[in-house]
């Protein structure tokens, strides 16, 4: 009777622990990302979200000087998906003389997404305050400035940087990771 009671208490304790500490959330599927982007509707009522098929992406032929800063512009200006990305979803909005491009890349797991984010932050740490030339559309030249904020107090880690040209044009990039995605 004591053994049976002890086993019952152990099972109940295990269930309570499991409910309070369920473990990491499952990674996003491509369908999950498509669902998130389905809600991004422009003011004219249309949605231009599309799946990013890594095998079919048409990469820009441009390059970045210095070459060591190129990873900061690969997925945005150069249209080159991050290494290790499985797929993604993106959208592009032209707004007057400005444009907004948003893309989320999906990785096999959160650790892979975090490695990509850390790769970008490492490059940023070396390129911050550097004069950078973007030899692709939109061509830009200027000082790279921004900020890197580490995760703290429930806030996700994020990286934001701007390349401001001599004529005042700004090319802004904001990178963050969530679960198995990098946006």
Image (cartoon, helix red, strand yellow):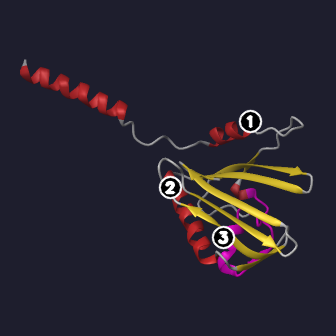
- Alpha carbon separation for disc pair 3 and 1: 29 Å
Q: What is the x, y in percent for residue 29? A: 59, 42
Indicate which disc, 2 or 1, sits on the residue closer to the N terminus. 1
Residues drawn in magenta: 56-79
Q: Is residue 161 above or below residue 178?
A: below
Residue that numbered label 3 is attached to: 71
Left or right, residue 138 beside residue 150: right
Residue that numbered label 1 is attached to: 39
Query: Residue at the spot x=75%, y=62% of the render?
Result: 172
Local packing at callout 2 (Cα closer than 10 Å; few below 14, some 14-19, many 20+) is few
Q: Is residue 38 above or below residue 129?
A: above
Instruction: Answer with the quarter of the image where residue 5 lies.
Output: top left
Residue 151, numbered circle: 2
Q: Is disc 3 placed on a helix, strand or loop?
A: helix
Q: What is the x, y in percent for residue 103? A: 71, 52
Indicate which disc, 2 or 3, sits on the residue closer to the N terminus. 3
Indicate which disc, 3 or 1, sits on the residue closer to the N terminus. 1
Query: Residue at the spot x=57%, y=67% of the render?
Result: 121
Q: Are marks 3 and 1 in contact (CB under 8 Å)?
A: no
Q: Nearer the viewer, residue 80 or 150?
A: 150
Query: Residue at the spot x=74%, y=35% of the render?
Result: 39
């Amino acid at each position: 009777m004591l053994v049976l009671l002890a086993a019952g208490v152990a099972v109940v304790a295990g269930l309570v622990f499991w409910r309070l500490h369920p473990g990491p959330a499952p990674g996003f599927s491509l369908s999950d990302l498509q669902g998130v982007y389905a809600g991004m509707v422009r003011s004219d009522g249309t949605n231009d979200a599309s799946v990013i098929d890594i095998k079919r992406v048409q990469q820009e032929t441009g390059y970045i000087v210095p070459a060591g800063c190129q990873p900061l512009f690969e997925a945005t200006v150069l249209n080159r998906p991050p290494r290790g990305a499985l797929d993604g979803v993106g959208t592009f909005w032209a707004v007057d003389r400005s444009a907004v491009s948003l893309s989320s890349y999906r990785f096999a797991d959160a650790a892979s997404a975090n490695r990509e984010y850390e790769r970008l932050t490492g490059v940023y740490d070396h390129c911050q305050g550097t004069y950078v030339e973007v030899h692709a559309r939109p061509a830009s030249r200027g000082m790279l400035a921004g900020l890197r904020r580490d995760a703290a107090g429930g806030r996700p880690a994020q990286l934001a940087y701007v390349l401001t040209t001599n004529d005042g044009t700004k090319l802004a990039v904001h990178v963050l990771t969530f679960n198995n995605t990098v946006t």
